[in-house]
Amino acid sequence: MQGQSVSFIRSWKMLTSEPDWYKPLIILALLSWVPILGTIATLGFAYEWARLAAWGVDCPPRRRGIDYGKLLATGGWAFLILISMSIVCSVVLGVCFGVGDSPLLPFDFGGVGSWNIWTGDEHYYISLVPRLLFALVCRVAAGGLVLAAMMRGVVYDGFAAGWRLDRLFQMIVCDPGGFVRLVGVSALGCAIGLVYSWASSILVALVAVSSVSSLFSWNDGTLYMGLDTEYLLRNLFTLGPAVALTALVFSAALSFVGSFVSVTLQTVAVHATGMWFRRFDVSRWGVSSDPLPDGVPHDSEQGGSTPHEPDQGASE
């Protein structure tokens, strides 16, 4: 018997347990630049691995013998649930707190604006106010819910299963600690991606404006970063063609590294979701409308089980 845990470190160690573990993630990072199809592929890769974790199999992601049709189908179900549920969550957060400008809640690592600290004059600002902080907590929790919804849709290979909010909330009520740990993994990934996004944006902007004082300014106790795209490009091309080309290549390299970081963090967060589902003995689940089986969540897991498919489809 092996103790269960939902943690960033455990999922990270599982991901990196084989040599050359980064190679499929590099390919996925390139694919992530392809609209829609790239997102489906990356979700399919992550959730096929998480499916194994949910069924009790401890292993790194598969790199051989992959059923690409199944991978894309899994990614497609996850993508549909991600888009639909994230939009609804964003609307709710927007109504309640004035946040939620980006619909991809669990995986939006790509910019400061995704955290709604963006003004209409194309400047970013940092303002620690209670309403914003509480809204961010709710946003991260909603991201954990979306991760779980996609996982449930993948378990049943269907869209409706991901929208069984009654069963998702039953899981949360039965194991609030496990859900909090899942949210923590997602939040840590968001924080790492956000710091990288800030750092890379500032580096590129510093090359363009050639002055820290031209990039930062204070106004009424608020720190502004002048990341107006038009302003930065105008300054960049006044530096000469050689410097401009170097800056553009540097920016492209940082963007690719950012894509790799985003895909890696997404894969870790999704695997942690599968580990949380394992606690609820997925092999005993019936149809999607059935309540959780008795005796879950487990404090320990049975190792060496072989994954098999549950009853497919979601009953209303």
Image (spheres, rainbow, N blue to C red):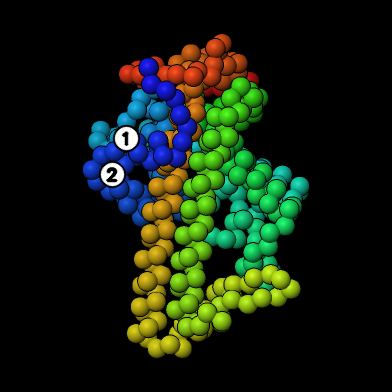
Q: What is the C-alpha distance between the residues marked 1 and 2?
A: 8 Å
Position of 171 relative to 263 (above/below): above
Residue 228: image quadrant is: bottom right
What type is the residue that disc 2 sits on?
Trp
Question: Element under label 1?
Answer: loop
Residue tagged by mark 1?
A: 60
Of the 4 image quadrants, the one containing the N terminus is: top left
Question: Element under label 2?
Answer: loop
Residue 311 visible in rendering: no
x and y percentages locating residue 302 in the rendered image:
39, 16
What type is the residue that disc 1 sits on?
Pro
Residue name at image x 65 percent, y 45 percent: 137
Position of 155 relative to 236 (above/below): above
| Number of other residues with Cα within 10 Å of mark 1, as a class: few under 14, some 14 to 19, many 20 or more | many
- Mark 1–mark 2 CB contact (< 8 Å): yes
> Which sits in the foreground, 179 or 285?
179
